[in-house]
């Protein structure tokens, strides 16, 4: 018993360390855990403060050149939703992907930010949807679609009609969603190297921001805005990166 008593503090310390490792530090979009503090919350989040290729950005002076088209191969997916405490995320079924210059990126999930995180010439959109893709080597590519209030969007409506009642738990529904419905008719895009826009702010992410905006209805916008009134990271310094725009 004496040996057990001596070991107990070390056992508890180990359990505490394991618990801390299992639960990343809390972060948010305001106050002491907001974007300006992310880099100080954990060593794992240091890139949020020290990174030189951080997202989002204000797209102000893109170099115009001939860019390869993005070929979309999206299929309908069973609607699986999770309110992760920062946004509403749709986990997408296998088989959907994009190809750019022959490189294939599988669609993993999409989620939204209100208002938009990306700006174009200093102006933000009403909403932004990030479609997160991954290639066979694990490299990430995010397709960003900017939204403005207007006509209803079928894909967005499907999501808002099935909002989960609990947080941090994936909810399977009897509905299907088609990510193609999120896209505008014209698919010209801006591109640059960036990062995840939430901790740990991992860099090396290829960004494609569609130039043409999609629309969603006022009711759809108000529903998502009520759920998360402000979940957008401020724009970050370009730090010498080149923005490109297709012609």
Image (tube, helix red, strand yellow):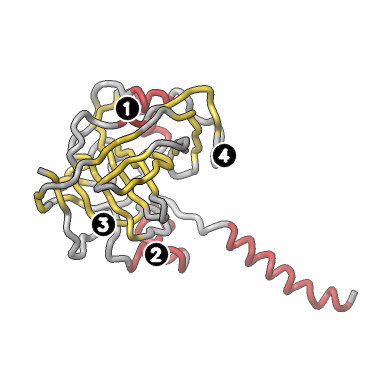
Are there few (<14), some (14-19), or many (20+) residues within 10 Å of tag 3?
some
Q: Is residue 144 left or right of residue 18?
A: left
Are there few (<14), some (14-19), or many (20+) residues within 10 Å of tag 4?
few
Label 3 vs 4, first from the N-terminus: 4
Q: Nearer the viewer, mark 2 or mark 3?
A: 3
Q: Does residue 113 appear in this view?
A: no
Q: Secondary structure at mark 2?
A: helix
Q: Is residue 205 left or right of residue 82?
A: left
Q: Is residue 125 left or right of residue 26?
A: left
Q: Which residue is mark 2?
A: 39
Label 1 vs 3, first from the N-terminus: 1
Q: Which residue is mark 1?
A: 181
Q: Secondary structure at mark 3?
A: strand
Asked whether the residues under the numbered discs 3 and 4 touch, taking CB atoms below 8 Å apart as contact, a structural biologist would say no
Q: Secondary structure at mark 4?
A: loop
What's the distance in space between the residues labelled 1 and 3, CA to CA? 26 Å
Label 2 vs 3, first from the N-terminus: 2
The residue depicted at 20 percent of the width and 36 percent of the height is 187
Instruction: Please state the horizontal and vertical placement of residue 184, each as a whole percent of the image.
Output: 23, 30
Instruction: Please state the horizontal and vertical placement of residue 117, each as a whole percent of the image.
Output: 28, 46
């Amino acid at each position: 018993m004496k040996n057990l008593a001596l070991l107990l503090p070390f056992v508890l310390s180990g359990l505490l360390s394991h618990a801390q490792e299992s639960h990343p530090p809390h972060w948010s979009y305001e106050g002491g855990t907001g974007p300006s503090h992310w880099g100080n919350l954990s060593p794992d989040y240091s890139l949020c403060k020290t990174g030189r290729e951080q997202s989002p950005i204000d797209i102000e002076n893109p170099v115009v050149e001939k860019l390869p088209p993005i070929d979309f191969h999206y299929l309908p997916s069973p609607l699986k939703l999770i309110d992760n405490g920062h946004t509403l995320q749709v986990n997408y079924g296998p088989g959907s992907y994009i190809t750019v210059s022959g490189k294939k990126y599988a669609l993993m999930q999409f989620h939204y930010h209100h208002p938009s995180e990306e700006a174009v010439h200093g102006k933000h959109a009403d909403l932004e949807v990030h479609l997160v893709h991954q290639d066979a080597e694990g490299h990430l590519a995010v397709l960003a679609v900017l939204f403005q209030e207007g006509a209803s969007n079928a894909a967005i409506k499907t999501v808002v009609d099935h909002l989960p009642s609990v947080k941090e738990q994936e909810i399977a529904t009897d509905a299907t969603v088609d990510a193609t419905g999120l896209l505008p008719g014209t698919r010209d895009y801006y591109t640059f190297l960036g990062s995840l826009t939430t901790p740990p702010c991992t860099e090396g992410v290829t960004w494609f921001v569609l130039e043409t905006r999609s629309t969603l209805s006022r009711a759809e916008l108000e529903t998502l805005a009520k759920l998360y009134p402000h979940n957008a990271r401020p724009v970050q310094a370009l730090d010498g990166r080149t923005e490109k725009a297709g012609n």
